Image (spheres, helix red, strand yellow):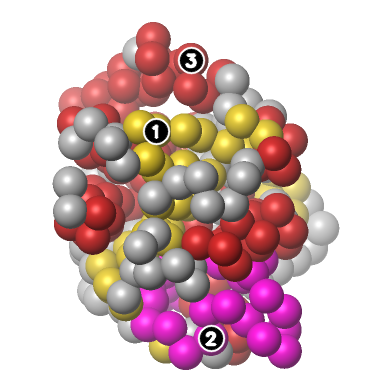
Amino acid sequence: MSSVLIVLSAATRWTQADGSQRPTGYWAEEFVEPHRAFTAAGLDISLATPGGRAPTVDELSLAPEANNGDTAKVADLRAYLESGSVQDLLTSPRRLEDVVPGDFDAVLIPGGHGPMQDLAVNEDLGRLLETALPDTSKVVAAVCHGQAGLLSAGSAESWLFEGRSLTAFSDEEETMTGLAANAAWLLESRLRAAGADYSKGPAWSPHVVVDGNLVTGQNPASAGPAAEAVLKLLAV
């Protein structure tokens, strides 16, 4: 049985350029759709956060206006998160600090703005990625703002993902949310500056980039397709 570690942000606030604190967390769809796909495929799923703190869902991700007005979709996401087995996973995550690199066949980092606050500078996540990515039998995946976590691996002089083809939430999409103007930094711009071979699809449409054992999805709509790409690489 293949195993996957889902790494979620434990941040509840996102520091803005003006110093204010915006509520944040993980984006519901970006956790639910991969978890659903991995469960259906029979993967052994573990969850870790910095400090082993229970992650907080970004309530905006459960608002109809953030889901094209689809109230049935919102109800499904909320019901999934509140189901017994998923609640058990979310309320008792492993400490990211205690995760042994190499113990998992795949690592997935969902988004929400939370990763920009904590995972982008988390040394333990960096250690995990520095073990997983060079091992081509393993898969590293991230969705939307989850790619902020990739910035933790290596250094400014030698970033682990330099030259790799990837996508992430675009500056265009961040501008469309109305959050770009007060963001301390923008993910697409930061990834490009670090040396990523960044590409994007149309705003809000599914766009997945597979570069060897690296899978990245651009936005919430890409979460399901990114999970399917992971399963394909794992040959599940």
Type of amino acid under label 3: Asp
Instruction: Specify whether residue 104 is in view.
Output: yes
Q: Is mark 1 in CB contact (under 8 Å) with mark 2?
A: no
| Magenta residue span | 150-178
Q: Check residue 162 in the rendering and tell me which mark sits there, or answer none.
A: 2
Q: Position of residue 190 (x, y in %)?
A: 59, 79
Packing grade of label 1 (10 A; few <14, some 14-19, many >=20) is some
- Dot 3: what SS? helix
Q: Is mark 3 in CB contact (under 8 Å) with mark 2?
A: no
Q: Position of residue 202 (x, y in %)?
A: 24, 74
Spatial distance from mark 1 to mark 2, Cα to Cα?
29 Å
- Disc on the earlier residue, 1 or 3: 1
Q: Position of residue 81 (x, y in %)?
A: 39, 22
Q: Is 154 within the magenta? A: yes
Q: Is 206 within the magenta? A: no
- Dot 1: what SS? strand
Q: Position of residue 204 (x, y in %)?
A: 28, 62
Q: Residue placed farthest to the right in the image?
A: 19
Q: Nearer the viewer, residue 14 or 80?
A: 80
Type of amino acid under label 2: Glu
| Residue beneath disc 3 | 88
Q: Residue at the spot x=28%, y=72% of the render?
A: 210
- Disc on the earlier residue, 3 or 2: 3
- When the figure is inspected, residue 168 is found, relative to residue 227, above or below; the finding is below
Q: Residue placed farthest to the top in the image?
A: 84
Packing grade of label 2 (10 A; few <14, some 14-19, many >=20) is some
| Residue beneath disc 1 | 45
Q: Is mark 1 in CB contact (under 8 Å) with mark 3?
A: no
Question: 102 left or right of 185?
Answer: left
